[in-house]
Amino acid sequence: MNRLIIFLGLILLISCKTKSLKKDIQGVWIFDKRINNQYLDDTSGFLGYQEPIIYDFQENGEVVFKNYSYKDTIFNWFLKSDTILTIDSLDYSIYSLNQDRMSLIDYNAVDTFWLMFKRPKKVKLDYNKPEIEKTLLSNIWTIDNMIDHKWETNFEYFDNKTMIYRYKIFDRDLNDSSDNLQLETWGVAKYNDYYFLYSFRDMLLGNGNFDRMNQIIDINQNSYVISDSNRKSKKAKFKAKSVNSNCQDRINKLNGNWKSFNSKDNTYGRYISKTAIKLGRIALFEGNLNLSVKENTVSFKIDTLEPLEYNWQLSKDGKILVLEYQIDEPKRKGIHVDYADILELTDTKLKVRLFNNNYYTGLEKPNRYLLNLIQVFEKIE
């Protein structure tokens, strides 16, 4: 009899613990990062892989898997034991769990991965999603603490769902220190009462380099704050940056026809495939590159080849020429964005640094020309 009582007591204890664990897991989690086990103790600054994903573990046994870079999916979930969480028939070992964080170990692949999750904070914002987007679009931004995060000291959100960072680097292509422009995607998402700011690599359209998602925990006309697990304070504050630029004057100067001479005396970049050149697939362009800037369109043209045509806009400081190419294919629809840094602009001279110096010819050989990275255009009548 005593053994039976002990046995029933253990079953009751395990059942209560499982119910408690289930309640602790239920609700919304931000997928914070995914780390290969071999890098877990890495001290070189490796932070793992982030993805713009939310998990919503619901009481009915479903988990809503919202992937803002791909699509939403609904899986089933349950606790196989007090140490094993099963999602869509795959088992994950529960390493740690509290009200703010959850760590799972994934043994389902060849390598072992650690999956880190964090709870979003319960905050009340005075702005809705359109108002948040409008605020982000209305300024150039800089991080509040610039000591350790110099690459975030100047960036702007654009209405084509891309953003561009400007920061100093040693440019190996130019063999000199210069401004680098880095393009990422961006979006604002609302889930339940939470607001998130996310980026992702759009491989179909060729925009963006990084995946990440952060909760927006405060915002006004002049600043915003996001959660950030990779900082000591667990948050990052950004503030609006004052801009002194007469964009309309620069737009007026840009309008018109321009010509730039390309030569092997100037750099095409360091990382050029010698094999592709030898086989005739790529050629270094020598000659005039024509540029036509109109109110809504920009076109680059070489001799009798088809022009490269874009819609365009200027950054708020008038220093970045943003080029938008509309893609309308069965499996690819949207805007691919290129960009150029305006180094000098007068009534008769336009000097730019290209970050995509490929000119696709439509021919079998060469199928593309490489242009000089630095283009010095002269205005022509």
Image (cartoon, helix red, strand yellow):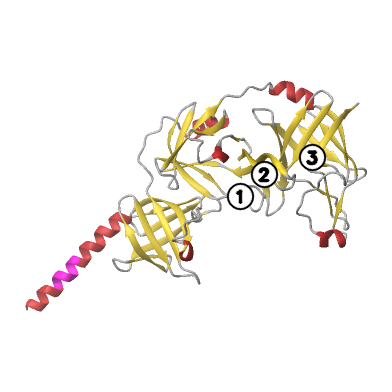
Nearer the N terminus, badge 3 or badge 1? Answer: 1
Residue 323 lies left or right of residue 300; in this view the side is left
- Compared across the picture, whether 80 is left or right of 73 comes to left
Against 105, residue 362 (above or below) is above
Q: What residue type is labelled 2?
A: Phe
Residue occupied by mark 1: 209
Amino acid bearing label 3: Ile
Crowd rating for badge 1 (residues with CA inside 10 Å; few <14, some 14–19, many 20+): some
Rendered-image quadrant of the N terminus: bottom left
Q: Name the residue under label 2.
A: 170
Residue 32 is inside the magenta segment: no
Residue drawn 77% across the image and 49% down it: 269
Horizontally, is 79 left or right of 51 in the view? left
The region drawn magenta spans 8-13
Within 10 Å of the Cα at label 3, are there few (<14), some (14-19), or many (20+) other Cα atoms? many
Q: Where is residue 36 in the image (x, y as percent from the top left)?
A: 48, 63
| Foreground: disc 3 or disc 2 | 2
Decide which of 177, 207 is in the foreground and name it.
Answer: 177
Q: Is mark 2 on a helix, strand or loop?
A: strand
Residue lying at the far left in this picture: please name it. Answer: 1
